[in-house]
Image (cartoon, rainbow, N blue to C red):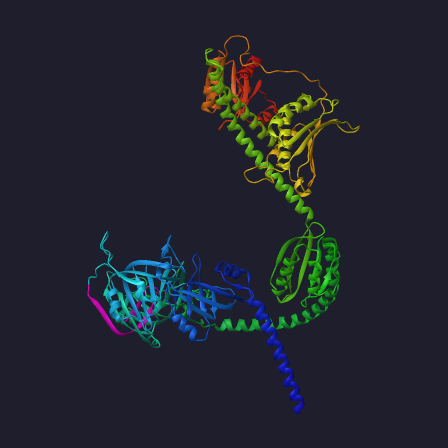
């Protein structure tokens, strides 16, 4: 027996040594990571659920005898509490004052209040080291900050271990745990005080009052100053009271309400009601209030407390006869009505044929209100707040808590006839129960057979659904696994697999396996958890994983179901939809900008043209140069608007047969001056390519954009850009002209090369590119009937291939008219100009007068129709974009009422013209804004 005991002792000692060694090793490992900054601790507060070592240094702003302290770290503050050992640690805290630099160490879970194992006073500081804030900022309390408040002292509550003050009309409560002589407190009463301390917390006195700031003060001698404000304003004093001071000695507090207490049959208004309880024995000094029958407390001393005396039971008539006001009573009655407001619960109680109005705070639990149903009998204990014999409710009671309302069971009273029918009903219920027993027994047998077949049906249903499915039983083992798991995840999980093994199998095929493991473990740890998340597979695509608990009919946990859906195609469609919406939004923006911008260019260009025509021939060419530069800027602005509309797919691309080689030679001359001396540009143009059906300006801009991108890819090193042309004529495909732009720059990975034509996508810095160049180029080429391809290899270079349709028409030489090449003189025309823009009307009217025509203007469509009804005009010059009545509606009305009227429409947004031309009602001519004088003259000649 002794040998067995010896072996047991030796085994226990070995196990203890092993545990001690493990604890030491764990402590050494954990000591390696010590939190030394408050920002790091705040980050761990939401992430770490395990204890951490910390060592922080901050300035003390508050402490209390209970071992709690608050440290300020500059932009943050934090609460700590001492370990429960009341030894030297608490003594060290008592020696610290506000502003002292304190170092705290501990090992605890990050949370709002952390336990302190070691406290060290680093340096005695001063209050100037703490930043002071106002107690209220923007009507909100500065909680857990070092604050300063200036107000008069209106009330004092003297405690055994300190005092509390009520300052000003805001009821800011100052609390201090240092004993202060009564003489000092009496000096402060009614005077202006400046208080510095920590805004410990806001205290909600009642549901009808605002939150009250509590300022914690460590040392009253340094943090409370007695002030007088003589200049510039007199001191803030409380209003004078009409009656002298009233004193109470050793009185018992009978009732406590949110804003007053009841003592010796009187109500005393006080801001300290939250710190006094019923049954407290106090000394009270108060003044007569301006409110009749009420006192205002100015001094309270806490002496002790007794158990509250059981109040007497009174009837309503006794309360009226004895004038039992401001006394606690108990009344029994029947609940007639129950009213609930935002902060108050009111009961109408019927007692001895008279009504009693009972008021109390709304209880937190709803069921406490539900028990106060109509006709229920209740005993209410509270303070007689008012007696009004002639009122509907002669007595009003103030109840501090719902616990003072005791509801009795309403007695059940049955008549003999009711008793007889009740017995018959009970007998019938017994017979029904017996019959139900036999029926239930047969149903159980039937359900057992159905249950056996339900398992096979569930298995068949799991195979019929499109998603992979796993069903775990209450023991966390796979009860059912569908074959679709392999299609969704590419792995197989068999029946009987444990949840840990199934987790490991699925984790291996997901890219973020750690996040999936956390979700998996959390779902099995919480039986009620429903989780749904999407993961990327390592091999291909994405999968959506959903899990929900399974409960039996008694709502007991009976397992968990997991589904796995392949959402690869859905993700692809979502990305394409998002891209389409982005392009549509940019297109709408471009169209709106284009119209207003073209209107501005029309005004500038028109006035510029008039200035140039009115200039005398004596002016030198140097005097004309600024006007020519402005004119060139207007033309560039018009081209820029055209490019913007091209990107938005809303511009009219004017294609005509063009010699691609000639265009590229002219573009190469421009690029040689732009690319830089370190880049060599070469052209390899095939002489046998046919003409292409293109818009020359758009193609030239596209080639320039791509060459500039190639220059940026080459960088500052020496490099080369080559432009080639060839004819791609395939038997079963449309004949195309191909332009290749090659560079030997840095190249791009495949994932970036796929996105180069997306709007706003760029690899350049924020101030170097907008990501619209290649997107605009693709829009222009596609409008011409072609397409662009891009291929790139990192560190080798990039190739852009532009495919353009060949033209079946011959190239025709056309030139622009000179500015003075106007139509020959002809009869003046009466022109009606319709445009909502006053500047446009003024400018175009001047152009018409220059051409020798008469012009009248209308600012909207309705005015134009009225003018057409009054007289006839040779031509109507109509703007398409107008409010209230659009140009299309005006044109339709003109065609109905004046079918022979000549109409020329103009717009700065070309898609509007496309919409109109597609209908049955067409104008006689169309002008693109901004249009020059020659274009206007040509349009008028064409229609007349």
Front one among 124 and 300: 124
Q: Give x and y (percent) for residue 485.
A: 73, 56
Front one among 487 and 723: 723
Q: Is residue 256 magenta?
A: yes
* Quadrant where the C terminus is found in the figure: top right
* Position of residue 934 in the picture relative to residue 656 (left or right): left
Front one among 161 and 261: 161
Inspect this view and state whether residue 527 appears. Answer: yes
Residue at image point 48% right, 71% down: 117
Give the tally of numbered discs: 0
Instruction: Determine whether 262 is above or below 853 in the image.
Output: below
Q: Is residue 251 magenta?
A: yes
In the orientation shown, which residue stands out farthest toward the bottom?
Answer: 1
Magenta-colored span: 243-263
* Position of residue 19 in the picture relative to residue 487 (left or right): left
Front one among 577 and 932: 932
Residue 25 lies in quadrant: bottom right
Residue at image point 66% right, 27% down: 784
* Position of residue 316 in the picture relative to residue 855 (left or right): left
Residue at image point 72% right, 69% down: 445
Q: Give x and y (percent) for residue 247.
A: 23, 70
* Quadrant where the N terminus is found in the figure: bottom right
Q: Give x and y (percent) for residue 198.
A: 38, 62
Inspect this view and state whether residue 865 appears. Answer: no
* Position of residue 907 in the picture relative to residue 551 (left or right): left
Q: Give x and y (percent) for residue 607.
A: 47, 19
Predominant SS along the magenta part = strand
Residue 663 lies in quadrant: top right
């Amino acid at each position: 027996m002794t040998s067995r005991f010896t072996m047991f002792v030796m085994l226990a000692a070995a196990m203890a040594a092993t545990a001690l060694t493990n604890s030491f090793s764990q402590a050494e490992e954990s000591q390696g990571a010590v939190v030394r900054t408050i920002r790091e601790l705040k980050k761990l507060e939401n992430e770490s659920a395990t204890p951490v070592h910390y060592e922080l240094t901050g300035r003390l702003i508050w402490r209390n005898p209970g071992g709690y302290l608050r440290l300020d770290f500059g932009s943050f503050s934090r609460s700590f509490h001492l370990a429960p050992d009341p030894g030297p640690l608490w003594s060290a805290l008592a020696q610290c004052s506000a502003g002292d630099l304190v170092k705290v160490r501990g090992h605890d879970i990050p949370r709002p209040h952390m336990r302190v194992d070691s406290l060290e006073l680093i340096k005695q500081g001063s209050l100037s080291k703490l930043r002071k804030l106002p107690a209220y900022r923007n009507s909100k309390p500065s909680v857990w900050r070092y604050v300063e408040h200036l107000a008069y002292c209106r009330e004092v509550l003297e405690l055994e271990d300190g005092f509390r003050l009520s300052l000003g009309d805001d009821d800011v409560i100052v609390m201090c745990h240092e004993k202060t002589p009564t003489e000092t407190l009496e000096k402060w009463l009614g005077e202006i005080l400046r208080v510095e301390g920590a805004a410990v917390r806001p205290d909600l006195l009642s549901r009808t009052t605002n939150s009250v700031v509590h300022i914690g003060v460590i040392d009253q001698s340094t943090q409370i100053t007695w002030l007088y404000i003589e200049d510039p304003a007199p001191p803030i004093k409380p209003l004078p009271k009409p009656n002298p001071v009233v004193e109470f000695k050793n009185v018992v507090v009978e009732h406590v309400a949110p804003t007053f207490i009841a003592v010796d049959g009187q109500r005393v208004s006080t801001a300290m009601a939250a710190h006094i309880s019923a049954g407290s024995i106090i000394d009270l000094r108060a003044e007569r209030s301006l409110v009749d029958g009420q006192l205002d407390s100015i001094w309270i001393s806490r002496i002790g407390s007794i158990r509250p005396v059981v109040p007497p039971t009174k009837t309503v008539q006794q309360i009226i006869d004895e004038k039992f006001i401001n006394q606690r009573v108990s009344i029994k009655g029947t609940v007639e009505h129950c009213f609930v407001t935002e902060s108050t619960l009111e009961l109408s109680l019927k007692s001895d044929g008279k009504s009693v109005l009972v008021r109390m705070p709304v209880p937190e639990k709803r069921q406490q209100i539900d028990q106060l149903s109509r006709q229920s009998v209740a005993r209410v204990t509270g303070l007689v707040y008012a007696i009004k014999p002639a009122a509907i409710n002669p007595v009003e009671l103030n109840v501090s808590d719902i616990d003072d309302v005791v509801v009795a069971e309403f007695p059940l009273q049955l008549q003999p006839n009711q008793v007889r029918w009740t017995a018959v009903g009970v007998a019938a219920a017994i017979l029904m129960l017996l019959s139900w027993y036999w029926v239930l027994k047969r149903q159980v047998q039937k359900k057992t057979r159905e249950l056996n077949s339900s398992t096979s049906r569930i298995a068949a249903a799991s195979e019929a659904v499109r998603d992979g499915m796993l069903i775990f039983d209450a023991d966390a083992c796979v009860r059912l696994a569908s074959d679709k798991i392999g299609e969704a995840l590419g792995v197989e999980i068999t029946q009987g697999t444990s949840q840990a093994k199934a987790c490991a199998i699925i984790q291996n095929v997901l890219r973020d396996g750690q996040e999936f493991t956390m979700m998996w473990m959390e779902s099995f740890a919480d039986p009620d958890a429903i989780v749904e998340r999407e993961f990327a597979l390592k091999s291909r695509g994405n999968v959506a994983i959903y899990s929900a608990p399974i409960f039996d009919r008694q709502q007991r946990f009976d397992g968990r179901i997991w589904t796995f859906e392949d959402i690869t195609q859905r993700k692809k469609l979502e990305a394409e939809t998002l891209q389409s919406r982005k392009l549509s939004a940019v297109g709408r923006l471009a169209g709106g900008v284009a119209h207003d911008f073209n209107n501005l260019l029309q005004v500038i260009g028109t006035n510029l043209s008039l200035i140039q025509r009115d200039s005398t021939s004596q002016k030198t060419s140097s005097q004309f140069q600024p006007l020519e530069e402005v004119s060139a800027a207007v033309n560039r602005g018009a081209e820029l608007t055209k490019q913007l509309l091209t990107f938005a797919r809303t511009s009219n691309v004017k294609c005509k047969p063009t010699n691609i080689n000639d265009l590229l030679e002219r573009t190469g001359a421009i690029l040689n001056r732009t690319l830089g001396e370190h880049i060599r540009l070469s052209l390899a143009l095939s002489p046998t390519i046919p003409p292409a059906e293109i818009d020359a300006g758009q193609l030239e801009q596209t080639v320039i954009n791509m060459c500039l991108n190639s220059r940026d890819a080459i960088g500052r090193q020496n490099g080369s850009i080559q432009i080639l042309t060839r004819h791609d004529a395939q038997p079963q495909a449309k004949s195309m002209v191909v332009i290749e732009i090659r560079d030997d720059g840095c190249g791009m990975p495949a994932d970036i090369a796929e996105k180069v034509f997306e709007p706003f996508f760029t690899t350049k810095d924020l101030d170097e590119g907008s990501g619209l160049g290649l997107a605009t180029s693709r829009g222009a080429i596609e409008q011409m009937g072609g397409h662009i391809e891009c291929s790139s290899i990192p560190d080798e270079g990039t190739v852009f291939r532009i495919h353009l349709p060949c033209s079946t028409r011959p190239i025709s030489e056309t030139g622009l008219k000179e500015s003075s090449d106007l139509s020959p003189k002809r009869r003046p025309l009466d022109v009606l100009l319709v445009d909502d823009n006053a500047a446009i009307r003024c400018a175009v009217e001047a152009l018409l007068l220059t051409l020798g025509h008469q012009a009248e203007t209308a600012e909207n469509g309705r005015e134009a129709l009225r003018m057409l009804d009054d007289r006839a005009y040779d031509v109507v010059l109509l703007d398409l974009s107008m409010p209230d009545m659009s140009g299309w509606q005006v044109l339709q009305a003109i065609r109905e009422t004046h079918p022979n009227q000549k109409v020329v429409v103009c717009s700065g947004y070309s898609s509007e013209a496309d919409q109109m031309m597609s209908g049955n009602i067409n104008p006689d001519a169309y002008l693109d804004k901004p249009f020059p004088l020659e274009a206007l003259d040509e349009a008028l000649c064409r229609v007349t």
